[in-house]
């Protein structure tokens, strides 16, 4: 009898051991599965677009969020002949009472662009399209536009000559156009984040080539680490990494699109007042904000304003931080930056 009891006890312990081991394997496998994110990468918006989701295995969501990116590119591109902005600039959008009719999204983004144009007093101006269309920083041909062409184009720039009423727009001068390249990626990133959240995603990174938007934090509660790029270095070479939770990191710099001719650098951040690239001792501006569209608008606005005025603007705004890098390689931080945004410097 004692032997039977002993055998039953051993069998019971063996069963318990197997159950514990199976539970461990299940939990470990589940943990490993959760720790492996799903990701997708493609060339869109004239840059590398990458979305990484940490708390979902739904590949359909990845495909849908990239489709959303395509949808907005078709609206906002200045160069695609099928885009809404291209048709607006060409004068082929439907009209009503002298106004062009915009989609709600396009009207919303133009209003945001006009806001930053007013805020900067025209140092940033979304009507710079007549000027920006003269410059080509991607073909490698290194052509400086004719001075008279630039002068004529500058005369057709002026955000104050745009009348936007809800989703209707008109220009008060012939030959004007809209350029949304400085803020479109931020707007698109925000819309992609909204979509992911609507699908139950709480941990993800949206990277639109210089525009990084974090959804929440890592599933383990740690912050995401986002690099502040070293100017004129490879994309993965950073000055420092910032700990980011549920915020946007956007950088604008002369190193993004430029060419060098006769020992001089010509970059894509153009001065609406003279039609040539800004020359103000700045190399890059990085903005950390809640919404990416604001980071986009502020990074270009602050670059245009220069170091002193740009810093003053950021220091006047709530929940917004910035890093300015000047030509001498020095970094300049907004007030209390390193208290609010922990940094780890590259060795």
Image (cartoon, rainbow, N blue to C red):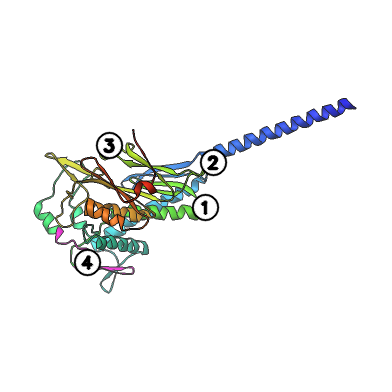
Q: Secondary structure at mark 3?
A: loop
Q: Position of residue 302 (x, y in %)?
A: 26, 53
How far is the residue under mark 3 from the one under mark 2? 34 Å
Query: Which residue was labeled with disc 1?
Result: 200
Image height of 79 relative to 329, above or below: below
How far is the residue under mark 2 from the one under mark 1? 15 Å
Q: Secondary structure at mark 1?
A: loop
Q: Secondary structure at mark 2?
A: helix
- Residue at 63% across, 37% down: 26
First in sequence: mark 4 or mark 3? 4
First in sequence: mark 3 or mark 1? 1
Assign the C terminus to one quadrant of the image: top left
Image height of 33 relative to 245, above or below: above
- Residue at 66% across, 36% down: 23
Crowding at dot 4, Cα within 10 Å, few <14 / some 14-19 / many 20+, comes out as some
Query: Which residue was labeled with disc 3?
Result: 233
Q: Quadrant of residue 12?
A: top right
- Residue at 45% across, 44% down: 223
Q: Which residues are magenta?
A: 154-172
Query: Which residue was labeled with disc 4?
Result: 160
């Amino acid at each position: 009898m004692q032997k039977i009891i002993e055998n039953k006890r051993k069998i019971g312990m063996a069963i318990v051991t197997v159950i514990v081991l199976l539970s461990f394997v299940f939990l470990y496998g589940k943990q490993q599965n959760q720790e492996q994110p799903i990701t997708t990468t493609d060339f869109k918006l004239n840059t590398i677009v990458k979305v990484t989701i940490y708390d979902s295995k739904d590949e359909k969501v990845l495909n849908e969020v990239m489709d959303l990116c395509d949808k907005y590119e078709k609206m906002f591109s200045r160069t695609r002949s099928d885009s809404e902005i291209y048709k607006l600039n060409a004068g082929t959008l439907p009209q009503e009472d002298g106004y062009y009719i915009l989609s709600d999204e396009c009207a919303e983004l133009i209003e945001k662009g006009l806001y930053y144009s007013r805020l900067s007093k025209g140092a940033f101006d979304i009507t710079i399209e007549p000027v920006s269309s003269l410059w080509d920083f991607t073909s490698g041909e290194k052509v400086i536009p004719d001075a008279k062409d630039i002068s004529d184009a500058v005369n057709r720039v002026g955000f104050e000559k745009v009348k936007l009423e809800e989703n209707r727009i008109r220009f008060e001068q012939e030959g004007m156009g809209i350029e949304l390249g400085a803020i479109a990626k931020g707007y698109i990133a925000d819309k992609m984040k909204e979509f992911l959240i609507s699908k139950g995603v709480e941990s993800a990174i949206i990277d639109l080539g210089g525009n990084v938007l974090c959804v929440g934090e890592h599933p383990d509660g740690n912050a995401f680490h986002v690099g502040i790029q070293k100017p004129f270095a490879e994309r993965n070479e950073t000055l420092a990494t910032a700990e980011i939770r549920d915020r946007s990191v956007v950088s604008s710099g002369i190193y993004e699109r430029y060419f060098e001719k006769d020992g001089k650098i010509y970059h894509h951040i153009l001065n609406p007042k003279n039609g040539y690239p800004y020359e103000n001792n700045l190399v890059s501006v990085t903005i950390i904000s809640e919404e990416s569209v604001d980071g986009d608008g502020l990074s270009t606005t602050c670059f245009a304003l220069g170091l002193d005025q740009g810093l003053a603007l950021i220091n006047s705004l709530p929940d917004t931080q910035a890093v300015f890098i000047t030509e001498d390689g020095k970094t300049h931080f907004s007030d209390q930056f390193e208290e609010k945004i922990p940094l780890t410097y590259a060795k």
